[in-house]
Amino acid sequence: MKIVMIAGAGGSGGLKEYLKGFLSHFEKTAPKSFKLSVICTPELASELCDTEMPGVKIIVSEKSATKIKDCLFNRPHAPEVISLVEKEKPDVVYFPNSFLRPGLERYKSVLEVHNQLYFQPRQLLRQGFGKATFSLLVQRRTALKSIKKADLVVFDSETSRRECISSGIKPKVSTVAYFGVRHLPFSDKKPGTKLQEKKEYIYISAFYPYKNHAKLLRGLALLKANGRDFTLRLVGSGPKHFVDAVRKEADLLGISANVVFENQVPHEKIPELIDKADVFIYASEIETSGLGLMEGMERGAVIACNRSSCLPEILGDGGLLFSADDPKDIADVVKRLSDDITLREKLSRKAREISLKYTWERHNEIIFGKLNELFK
């Protein structure tokens, strides 16, 4: 079976990590009869070259990127891209970024859904009525139409699929394939046991309203009011006005001295930062897969997680859940995880154990098995 993937510019950081994981495990997970070509921009091709991808053919085309105007006006793929696809003579065209565009209808299509905001307009509108929201609303319209048209839709969690269907968008055929996560060796540190006198908490996420940075600060402000000293490390970037709003919230709550803004950190440094923290916090409101949460689980972190979206599905009993809308609940959960060493050790082991099922091998095998079933 010949597969052509149109990766374009790659999209978000999470989507680029997805591409690297999926493509780097292609040869060892796909049936021998499967061949894969990836059409992408020069910039994405350069990033992918940092990852070993045996069996994958990279085809570079500046025209493969999808822009907001393409979605808004339902523009077909560029003639150059259509020509490149036709030369490969594929059985299936794979779209990893949630969009189908006109021009390639003659081929069977596979669509991977990577943005849960498409099914939650209330969360989308929390960003305010600006350019970013308009862009997402246009993308949402295109994505929902694409889900209905695709021959196979791949969701990253059962929650993602359920929320799609409950919003009135029913795919022809769908499957669930959880993200994979890199499983790295530990240092001499025994996960879950280290505790510092001044507790260190970490939240790794881009800055958007649905990521709930401000709500997290309100919960931790209660800890400080009760005499608890801590450092909260916020790792990630985002639009300046969203970051500034979180800084302002920290000032208003009187905890700005406790909050460290790390901005963008190289991905290879993330495990080290997770290992240094006493509690790993994941406060997001809506996710397709919770890749950031999976990375904390893989390190055997002691996890406090929002009780929302797919996150309880991903975490299982590998951590404690809180409601991001309840500051006292946040404070109580984080305090308990900071103080109970027996609970810390138990949850650390369990988080690591659960994370072992999230592999790119398993992700790919589910998808390739479905392709064999539908299109062989």
Image (tube, grey):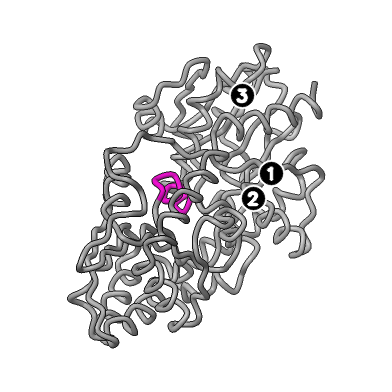
For the residue marked with disc 1, what is the amino acid?
Val
**Majority secondary structure of the magenta segment?**
helix
Using the image, tell me which numbered label, if any, was put on residue 157.
2
In this orientation, which residue lies closer to the viewer: 53 or 187? 187
Residue marked by disc 1: 176
For the residue marked with disc 3, what is the amino acid?
Val
In this orientation, which residue lies closer to the viewer: 113 or 81? 113
Q: In this view, does 183 lie above or below 318?
A: above
Q: Which of marks 3 and 1 is nearer the N terminus?
A: 3
Which residue appears at 40% of the width and 63% of the height? 281
Q: In this rendering, which labeled residue sits more in front, label 3 or label 2? A: 2
Query: In the orientation shown, which residue stands out farthest toward the top?
Result: 32
Give how far across and how far down residue 157 sits, in percent. 64, 50
Q: Residues within 10 Å of mark 1 (few under 14, many from 20)?
A: some
For the residue marked with disc 2, what is the amino acid?
Ser
Query: In the orientation shown, which residue stands out farthest toward the front?
Result: 342
Which residue appears at 77% of the width and 50% of the height? 148
In this orientation, which residue lies closer to the viewer: 135 or 313? 313
Q: In which quarter of the image is the N terminus?
A: top right
SS at mark 1?
strand
Give how far across and how far down residue 323 sits, in percent. 52, 75
Residue marked by disc 3: 85
